[in-house]
Image (spheres, grey):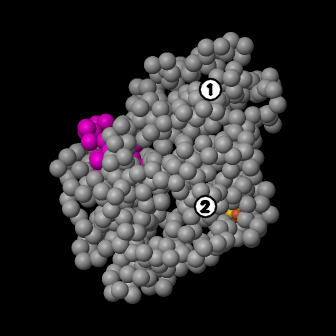
Amino acid sequence: MCLATVAKVLEVDPSKGTAWVDFGGVEREVRIDLMPDVKPGEYVLVHTGFIIEKVDEKTAREILNAWDEVFEVEPDAMGGYYYPGDRT
Amino acid sequence: MKDVERVIAPYRDRAIAQKLVEKIKEEAKTLDGEIRIMHVCGSHEDTITRYGIRSLLPKNVKVVSGPGCPVCITPIEDIIAMQRIMRKAKEEGEEIILTTFGDMYKIPTPMGSFADLKSEGFDVRIVYGIYDTYRIAKENPDKTVVHFSPGFETTTAPTAGMLNAVAQEKLENFKIYSVHRLTPQGIEVLIKQKSRIDALIDAGHVSTIIGVKGWEFLSERYGTPQVVAGFEPNDVLMAVLLLIRMYKEGDARVVNEYKRSVKYEGNVHAQKLIDKYLKVVDAKWRALGIFPKTGLKVRNEWKEFEIRNFYKVEVPKGLPELEKGCLCAAVLRGLAMPTDCPHFGKDCTPRHPIGPCMVSYEGSCNVFYRYGVLY
Ligand code: SF4
Ligand code: SF4
């Protein structure tokens, strides 16, 4: 039930509390009550017709690049091990 | 969208998955005994089963599912109470339009489901979200429109957001029947009872609302390592790897694997709206008992939003919560796998479900059945 889908914001209408978003071809009207400051062009997570968060593409890419780190860590070097980006 | 797909693709990449599995196997060799990792989200079960993740893991790494689906754990008393409210309203000459989600609609009780109510001629409608309910309320100003509203934090947030909009507009015919539940607090009860949980995969989109912060008390109080994980197969494999490592190190904290969508503090605006309209109360979880401080009810200041404040109905006590022989209670505690149930796939299927775990799309039995159980 909580699965949310990624969409791109096309237009925002603050007076109505809605935005038009594009789910990769399918466009829909969604509510912005939980994320009032969304802007066109941003990627967002949509759950049951509500934008619940912005999707941070940059972080997604950075974390993937940093996964290599994980593949290299030795099992016995685990003390102080952190997940990439977890320190911030 | 293309961009996002490019970002997501590596989280499904086979070569990366293989590397992760190798690492997991390596780590598991030096594990003292076995590790039981519980995930608490039906969507995680979907990823795990669809991609056959259990079959890739070493024998001493067990991934079990917890009470991951709010539909499965909604008490039958509430479904029956809502049915009775519909009947009472009709007797009094009033008309209620009831909306709820597709899987909630079919959940059986000893006194029938919402689908049965519909077949008797009552106006019951399946919606995709509470925004649809709002639209129906606008289109039917002379009728009361009630959303039977289950869900963990991810779904509670839209409910609160909608109530806020409705309060501002003074839309009087819009009501809810709240059966919302709090996820981490529910898991705490399971940990306190004797469910053996060595580590937790935290629900990604619940975390989008409550943040990493919302889970921390579990690590602090019970020493449970946790990973907030996304819903792609490599997200889950990475979570398993990190959890084995943390478990071995005795490292009890919450690592955020799903940074692309989850912030440390979560969606603060959503949290404020939830808190404005809803208040924490003790609540029953179907087949599991009463869990203290795990339910949400509409605050008294907003009592006109809760249909229960308009109709008082009685529900018979002591109704059997599950059909005889249904193992859902054990499945929801991570103590049994759907395949342990003698009914599974025989007389219990999504077409003819015996228990709630087979009805709900996110129930473990339903997920196992749909993907033909790879494990
Ligand atoms: S309701 Fe949410 S937390 Fe529960 S199973 Fe569904 S997606 Fe996961
Ligand atoms: S297979 Fe059916 S009867 Fe068995 S636990 Fe699942 S829902 Fe219950």
Q: Residue B360: horizontal and vertical position, in percent?
A: 58, 61
Q: CA distance from mark 2 to mark 1?
A: 30 Å
Residue marked by disc 1: B252
Determine the residue positioned at 32% across, 82% down: B94
Look at the numbered discs 2 and 1 and tell me whether their residues touch, using CB distance below 8 Å. Answer: no
Q: Is A33 above or below relative to B328?
A: above
User: Which quadrant, please, contains the N terminus of chain B?
Assistant: top left
Residue marked by disc 2: B286
In depth, the one of B91 and A14 nearer the eye is B91
Determine the residue positioned at 65% across, 46% down: B190
Which residue of the protein is positioned furthest toward the left in this rendering? A15
Per the image, is A45 magenta?
Answer: yes
Q: Residue A8: horizontal and vertical position, in percent?
A: 34, 41
What stretch of residues is rendered in magenta? A31-47
Q: Amino acid at mark 1?
A: Ala
Determine the residue positioned at 34% across, 58% down: B300
In the image, taking residue B287 as reference, residue B255 lies left or right, namely: left
Residue B23 visible at all: no
Per the image, is B335 magenta?
Answer: no
Q: Is B14 above or below relative to B161?
A: above
**Badge 2: few (under 14), some or many (20 or more) residues near its Cα, within 10 Å?**
many
In the image, taking residue B168 as reference, residue B69 lies left or right, namely: right
Determine the residue positioned at 30% across, 58% down: B302
**Badge 1: few (under 14), some or many (20 or more) residues near its Cα, within 10 Å?**
many
Marked residue chain, label 2:
B
Residue B182 visible at all: yes
In depth, the one of A24 and B239 nearer the eye is B239
Q: Amino acid at mark 2?
A: Arg
Marked residue chain, label 1:
B
Q: Residue B234: horizontal and vertical position, in percent?
A: 60, 34
